[in-house]
Image (spheres, grey):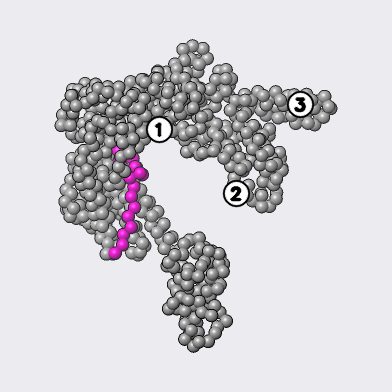
Amino acid sequence: MADPRTYRPRTGEIPTTPGVYRFRDQHGRVIYVGKAKNLRSRLNSYFAAPHTLLPKTRTMVFSASSVEWTVVSSEFEALQLEYTWIKEYDPRFNIAFRDDKSYPYLAITMGEEFPRVQVMRGDKQKGTRYFGPYSQAWAIRDTVDTLLRVFPMRSCSTGVFRRAKQSGRPCLLGYIGKCSAPCVGRVTPEEHREIAQEFCDFMAGKQQPFITELEKKMRAAVAELDYERAATLRDDIGALTKAFTKNAVVLKETVDADVFGIEQDELEAAVQVFHVRGGRIRGQRGWVVEKVDDSDDAELIEQLLQQVYGDATRENERIPRQVLVPVLPADLEDVTSWLSGLRGSHVKVAIPQRGDKAALADTVRENAVQALRLHKSRRAGDLTTRSAALQELQDALELTESPLRIECYDISHVQGTNVVASMVVFEDGLAKKSDYRKFSITGDAARDDTAAMYDVIHRRFRNYLAEQAERVASGPVPRGGGSIDDAVAGAPRPKFAYPPNLVVVDGGPPQVAAAGRALEDLGIADINVVGLAKRLEEVWVPDSEFPVILPRASHGLFLLQRVRDEAHRFAITFHRQRRSAAMTASELDEVPGLGPVKRRALLKAFGSVKKIRAADLAELTAVPGVGQSLAIAVMRTLGSPALSEGADAGDAGGETERAAVNVSTGELLD
């Protein structure tokens, strides 16, 4: 760890204007991003007496080796730049709100010709309207099943829709009246889109007009003595009323709001939000976050709103007119302006003081209390296990520091063919898949496992040294000045810039010796290497006659096994991809200028490479997209008999019934 006094800037160097600052570690990695109204005041607070800092702030300051800042013209610009940099660098010490589950949404794909209603999770897609999130997927399906009686729109998959369209027969839902069957033309695309729009309007809170209209139609049917239609309309009204009353009315029907509640202790915080649309609770969502700095409640709320609504894309319905919070954000005016800009209209951020909104806010906070309690009971064991595993490895392997970053390498091949290697990364005991890497191994390096291991370790750390040298040559980032665009448009993040505390190889002494020799040849002496042998799960260290034996129930051994198994899985997956590609190779792949589209066209026209080889020039050029020059290239590559026939015919001066080509000139022979 670095001493903060070695990189603390002079007080007079730091401007007193608004700006955004970044702390970097010894490898140049951004570990914290923050903003300040007064950069000098905020940065000086980090270099106070260490015993006055909170534990996590003290850890961050001692983990850093440099600090830099960018001056902006206003606090609003600082808010925007801070959010941009947090998303770009994913700093270790910034608060990261993570969902405690993957929430399902009710989605209507209005961007399709025939919109479909379905349950969706994950990233939002353009042209799709979302309602929710819901706490349970079955709640969405129950609602959809009820509403399809009144709004019979498509709910089938693309495959089912296509098969029904080809066969001319609708699926079961079309027969029982829960789908208008656009697949067989019972309704036009315009009529089906109108049904889908009515479905969206109902889910958006406009329920009462539909119920009122159906009641009028039911009374009219009764007056005309059409009791059958009246009974159908009565059942439709019952279905809408059932869906309408699924969510209790908590506020006025005109209220659209997100209500946040928070509960926290010194180390963690739990956040809950209720999504209220049309006066009803449409969904619930929760996060649990580890507090990594000394942010107060106002700053925590500001960071929460940044993350929740910063990813809201351009769908206006995702940001409501009101955002109700337990504490106003630190920069209320700037946050309000930012949210209003994202929504396209005014957004009000407020604390509910009395009435139904305050009562609902108390309910949300109680949910946050319960969520934090449940999280602690579930995660305590896991956090303890990871910490114990890292400590056990440090003690057993006699490491100078805890192996917070572990890299594991594995070689995969079948009898020496398609040799590949994998590199997986674990940080703080958890997999960091964004840092995984694949290696293809060819030539002399592929002759055996030890040569392959030497090659992959040498390549990985050769790249590391090159990137470190490039970073040193480029010089430090200048402090102060510059525009937001200049600050954001930085160089791409390097792939191999961060060295591990521990390298694990899959194998015994030969593989460990090969890895150690690769590091030694590069002049790297501060990275520890061990090998984990599969047979007895022995841990081998370089230049040791005997292995380190960890207890079978050891948390450290379990962590090494997880890392090794993940590297093996990743290597096997890559090897299978390479092997499949090799097995599907064709002679047509060698034809210059022949791409996959025209290759498929040739195979479709002739059926096999053998028949393509037997074809003459006229037959080849008859295939759409294949010209004379490409056909000649195909014939040459495949060794077509028509080439020799053409040559013989040219030499003899005779004629042939097949179209032929001169092998030397490529000209069509008459």
Residue type at tag 2: Gly
C-alpha distance separating marks 2 and 1: 34 Å
Name the residue at 45% across, 71% down.
633
Q: Quadrant of the N terminus?
A: top left
Point out the tag, 2 or 3, that comes first from the N-terminus. Answer: 2
Q: Which residue is mark 2?
A: 159
C-alpha distance separating marks 1 and 3: 49 Å
Name the residue at 40% across, 23% down.
335
Point out the tag, 2 or 1, that comes first from the N-terminus. Answer: 1
Magenta-tinted stretch: 427-443
Total of numbered circles in the picture?
3
> Residue 246 has which mark?
none
> Residue 218 has which mark?
3
Magenta-colored stretch includes residue 442:
yes
Under tag 1, what secondary structure? strand
Point out the tag, 1 or 3, that comes first from the N-terminus. Answer: 1
Name the residue at 65% across, 35% down.
194
Residue type at tag 3: Met
Q: Residues within 10 Å of mark 2 (few under 14, many from 20)?
A: few
Observer-nearest residue: 226 or 564? 226
Observer-nearest residue: 18 or 452? 18
Q: Nearer the viewer, mark 2 or mark 1?
A: 2
